[in-house]
Image (spheres, helix red, strand yellow):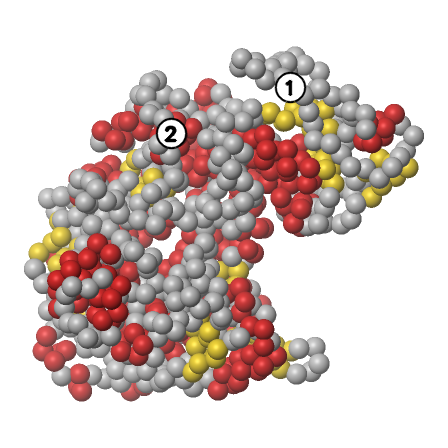
Amino acid sequence: MAPTLAHPANVNFVDEQQRPVHADASTYYGGEERFSRSRTYSASFAHGYNPKRAPVFGDEWHQRSRRMSHDEKGSAPRRFLIDVDETIRVVLEQEDTDGDFQISVTDAGPKLMALGTATSNGFKTFDIRGNYMLSNLLQELALARDHGRKRIVLDEARLTENPVDRLSRMIKYSFWNALTRRIDGEGLEIICADPKNRTGRVNPRIYIPHGEPAMAEYYRQVAREKPHLNLDVQVLPPKPDDPVYVKSLNNKPGILALAMQEVDNGKGQKVLKGIPFVVPGARFNELYNWDSYFISLGLLVDGYVNLAKGMVDHFIFEIKHYGKILNGSRSYYLCRTQPPFLTDMALQIYNQLDRSDMEENRRWLKRAIQAAIKEYHTVWVAEPRMDPKTGLSRYRPDGLGIPPETEATHFTHILEPYAQKHGLSVLEFSERYNDGTISEPELDEYFLHDRAVRESGHDTTYRFEKRCANLGTIDLQALLYKYEVDIGTAIREVFDDELELEEDFPLAAFPPSPESYADKSKWERSTSRVQKSEEWFRRAEWRRGVIDKYCWNESKALYFDYDTVQEKQSLYESVTAFWTLWAGCASEEQCWKLISQSLKKFEVLGGLVSGTEESRGKISLDRPNRQWDYPYAWPPHQIMAWVGLERYGYLEDAQRLAYRFLYMMTTAAVDFNGVVPEKFDAVRLSHLVDAEYGNQGIDFKMVPREGFGWMNAAYQVGLTYLSTGMRRAVAACTSPEVFFGQSTNTQPAHSSQAYAAANNDPLGLAMDTLKLSSPVIEATSLPQAPPQLQVSEDAQKEEQQHEDQNGSRR
């Protein structure tokens, strides 16, 4: 039975506003409800008489007849008249059998619901069928309720919308907005919420950098004007990243102030206002370093140039006041940074700024490049991160004690033997170890590497287990090569080959050596001379030679990390080797070897995995899986590979990889209520990940509101790589195996990959992940395409041939 409608007496509900069918929710559901007087017979049923019969289920059958291809179809688009709250109740009661407020393929409901048509004022009905339409219905109802609607006229086209168009639209018009934060009096309540805070204190605390008295007074004024916040305003010392001081803040965590701008308050007065930025989402509710780079790429695709520009402004502020671009803008991150992307981020944004004021654009880029040069010299080529003997930089942050932002039990298995040794509970030992009462050098070494893993962004992976701080990783060398090339290019092309530095700091010796780093008093100061492009290009060429010397392995056709302590390569096969293509530091021959010999080691059904199964090793109860190892796939690795492959002219490979990843994302959204998670199991094509703390971005009710920052960006960036035919095939959930054919040279090589290829059914994979049933390897079962979007293989191939002939990317 269709959900009942609650009309005012003797009226019909009408919606005469002509809104675009696929408009964003605020446009589509904006406005107010309207009614008109009616004498039609259909008004009577809303107040007691309802002639419709419910589907009768029993013995696996019901009375609904199947739709046939020759059934009569109306000429006008179908629209439904819906009571929002009642329909939500019925949908959840009937279809959400696992009680998670989502409609997914793992739910055991009938996947069928009748809705009253708007043209009959709800008297006649039409069946909504299938998981995709029903989950879209639930999402639309939730959005309508968000906008205060009790009754709506809903276009069927919103339920059958092309899933690629729908997901891209939601990212552009909904998710980015939901992830946007601001640190000022208006945004504090949202941004101060910290799911990682284990101290029990929920009242907000903000730390203001030394040397910003106006900002400190602003927040004190906010605290006075909003006493209900209980805002605690603290000013940091001149050196806020001193490890002892940072450890003293472990029990007093807070948000770090970021850049603000002066705006007119409408009364002729200038007031401070926070610059908006985008957070990753879920438990990560602050500005992050390398997340922000990939997020900015998505923002640029969607036209949010000023929002991306604001995040660079925050990074400039962080380098000035906190000494580095922080891992995240919380007090417990003050000692750590993350992979450096500032130069490319600034140049990408600069190229899309409004050209009406080029002088202001150059001033903005100058600030960004000056900040990057300071970060380069004082962080990445300064000790302890620089190894003067090899010239390789490392992730090697300062810090003391146990990282406070982790889950409460994250280090229990590490701490237990030490606690037993001292006859203490784990909690007691942790407290005494943190305050320095107990000294354990081996544990100090462990946490040195653990902090380095977190600084690398790849937390955690067996690639870095107990050795990360000693590794000159291939990804960091590639990023710093790109820094050097970008800085040289900007100085030459934008600043007439001369750039003055305004802040005073030491310029690291070049080329690095143990002797030149032994006496830092001889180092030049930044204000002693102007920066020239030739110096930076020399640095880049020198680094290219160091990368080839220490990281390139000719026999294995792959780049590897180099252990600066053991003085040998670490032979863990990591997909970050392809970052050299993004940076441009690989030769044409090295690129060809990477693609022809090594790419197949990482390419699986859903894109690129972080590392190979062989490198990861066997998994057991005593050696659980890590989220940055095989078989997991992350957006940064995909985007860097796409861009790198295109840079060297291998566009078809980039398109194939983009297709795989977007196919995995799209099928997850179709089958699981529009979900956009933090990461995927790319072998099993599943977002139901149980490694470490599980997955982020999947815990929502009825409608996804944020997605996840860099996954949103990967979708929008990935779509720019697909041809029209590829985009249509992704929308029809056409498996990469079908689209690219079984003759491809990227056939699964591992037994687990073969299993996934043989059992590529999202319902079966999800049920297996949930341990509800044991999947059986049978003939390939492809995911069901959304209604009205099935594409024949012949038509798809014909379309692809057409695209190939025209050489189109879109």
Residue found 56% across the figure and 31% down from its top: 95
Q: Residues within 10 Å of mark 2 (few under 14, many from 20)?
A: few
Residue 48: give x, y in percent of width and height. 81, 28
Residue 728: give x, y in percent of width and height. 50, 32
Residue 378: give x, y in percent of width and height. 27, 76
Name the residue that disc number 2 marks: 772
Image quarter of residue 464:
bottom left
Residue found 46% across the figure and 55% down from its top: 281
Q: Nearer the viewer, residue 538 or 212?
A: 212
In-image side of 462 versus 51 (left or right)? left
Quarter containing the N terminus: top right
Residue 180: give x, y in percent of width and height. 53, 60
Image quarter of residue 443:
bottom left
Height in image: 769 above or below 642?
A: above
Determine the CA span between mark 2 and mark 1: 28 Å
Height in image: 490 above or below 15?
A: below
Label 2 sits on a secondary structure element that is: loop
Q: Nearer the viewer, residue 54 or 150?
A: 54
Residue found 69% across the figure and 40% down from its top: 84
Q: Nearer the viewer, residue 458 or 23?
A: 458
Sequence order check: which comes first, mark 2 or mark 1?
A: 1
Q: Is residue 4 visible?
A: yes
Q: Amino acid at mark 1?
A: Pro
Q: Amino acid at mark 2?
A: Leu
Label 1 sits on a secondary structure element that is: loop
Mark 2 vs 1: CB contact within 8 A: no
In-image side of 529 versus 547 (left or right)? right
Name the residue that disc number 1 marks: 55
Q: Nearer the viewer, residue 555 or 106?
A: 106
Number of on-image labels: 2
